Structures are given as C-alpha cells and as structure tokens.
Image (cartoon, helix red, strand yellow):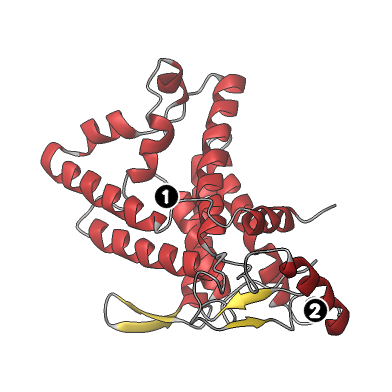
Amino acid sequence: MRDPRNAIERFCIKHPNFGIPGLMKYIAIGNAVVWLLYMIFGAGPVIGALAFSPSAVLRGQVWRLLSFAFIPFNTSWLGLISVYFFYWIGTVLEKNWGTPQFNVYFFMGMLLTVLTGFIVFAVTGISYAITSSYYIYLSMFLSFAVLFPDVQVLLFFVIPIKMKWLALVDIVFFITGIAREGFPNSLIPIVALLNFLIFCGGDILSLIPGISRRPKVINYKEAARRVNRQQNRAPYTRKCSVCGKTDTDYPDMEFRYCSLCQGYHCFCAEHINNHIHFTE
C-alpha cells in the first residue's frame, strides 16, 4: 500500500503556491473575535450560530461547514492564551512543512470532521453539533510534539516542561474524549487522530529504535546530471522542495541539497535543516 503522506507531499511539491500563507493568523483572529462575542452575548447564541450541524447545513446554513473552526479551543479567560498558543504551534508547523502541506493538514482535519458528521447523521439520524475544532487543535499539538519533542514551554508561565511530556497529556485528552463521547460521537476524535497519523506516523516510527529505516544510498552524480538536465529547461537553477522559492526570485538566498532525502532534493536556507525527509 502506498504511503498517503507521499501523495500529499508530491501534491505540495507540484503546487508550491497552494493554500493560504499564514493560515493560523486568520484562524487566530477569528478565534479572538468569537471569544469576544462569547464575552458579550454568552456562549449559547454564539455556538448556536457557528457550530457545525449536519441538519442545519442541509437546511441551507452552509457557513457552518467553516465557521466551527473559529470557535475557540477554550471559552474561559484562558481562551486568548490558547488562541495564541495554537497560533504559535500552527505557524511553526507551516514554516517546517511549508504552506501547502500545513493547509492540507488543517483543512483535511476539517474535511474528515465534516464527513464524519454527515455519515453519522445519515446512518443514525443524530445531528451531532461540533462546537469547535477542539480535536483538530489537539492533533496539531501532537504533530508539533513529534517534530519538536525537546522544545520547552512554560506551563502556567512558570514550570518549564518539554513538549514530549505535554504530548502524553494530549493523548490522555484524546482517550478520555473517545471514552466520554461514546459511539458514534467518538468518531470525531478518532478521525482527528487519523489525520495526525497520516502526516506524522512515519516520524513516530523513526523515533522507535530498530524500526526507523535508513534512507537508500543514491548515486549523487547520476542524480545531479538528471536534475541539471531538467533545470536547463526551467527558468531557474535551484528550487526549494518545501516552499517553492527559486534562485531566480531570491538571488541572494543559499540553496543546498539534502543527503538524507531519497532522491535529489533542493532546499532553501530556511528549510535545509527544517524539513521532513523525502522517502521515495
């Protein structure tokens, strides 16, 4: 079976301009606005207007397909802190993966959530109201922890703790959520985990001793000749495999090749040490 992440990465490489640059900035602004509306009008009217509900969408309230993503992770006074925290996480993930891949990650999480809601409604008649992107944000946190396990944050602004330990708490949230919701509502956190595994499953395996696979040794001379032949027909000499920047558009930027990627892949200075290695 082909790795679905490889298909996603190929799509992102072929479409370097896909997606919304700085997506989490707009999500965070929307979250902050909705949080403010909570404070003014109360949670009930706001959730009632923005939550995703299959039956409401079928009645013509199509904005709910997107608006639930702007409902904050937390509606208490900690809400704004959580908005900033996930804005930071999303921004770092976008810099690491590139804009196309991060957009695919976030919108795939939303799409899987919406499809699950419609399937549950079609099978059971239950129109489960999804009142935020709670599990999508939790899956983003897990992705960040897998990529940057030793990054420290200040818990309660005082206690330094590494992301890999907070990830264990995040997993507990998933487990308790699945147990608390009960079938079929428990499918919502499950599909969020599925989205996380599609993008980060290989990275998890690479952290387990004895399971990680060594990349194939490639013939660099032959690969270089092949790439140079292709580039002779292009209007640039070097192009970053993550963000799509070229030496034509950024003549002062350094471009280098990664020896750990399978194949012959070029990266800009921003991504040479900050990318997911190609495995094909």
State the count of labels: 2
* Residue tagged 1: 134
Side of 47 relative to 109 (left or right) = left
Q: Is residue 179 visible?
A: no
Side of 248 relative to 32 (left or right) = right
Mark 1 → mark 2, Cα distance in angstroms: 45 Å
Side of 154 relative to 15 (left or right) = left
Say if 164 sits above or below 43 in the image. below
Give amino acid for label 1. Answer: Tyr
Numbered disc 2: secondary structure: helix
Q: Residues within 10 Å of mark 1 (few under 14, many from 20)?
A: some
* Residue tagged 2: 224
Relative image position of residue 58 (x, y in whole percent) = 46, 17
Q: Quadrant of residue 155?
A: bottom left
Numbered disc 1: secondary structure: helix
Along the line of sight, the residue nearer the viewer: 31 or 6: 6
Relative image position of residue 208 (x, y in whole percent) = 72, 77
Say if 226 sits above or below 22 in the image. below
The residue located at (56%, 46%) in the rendering is 108
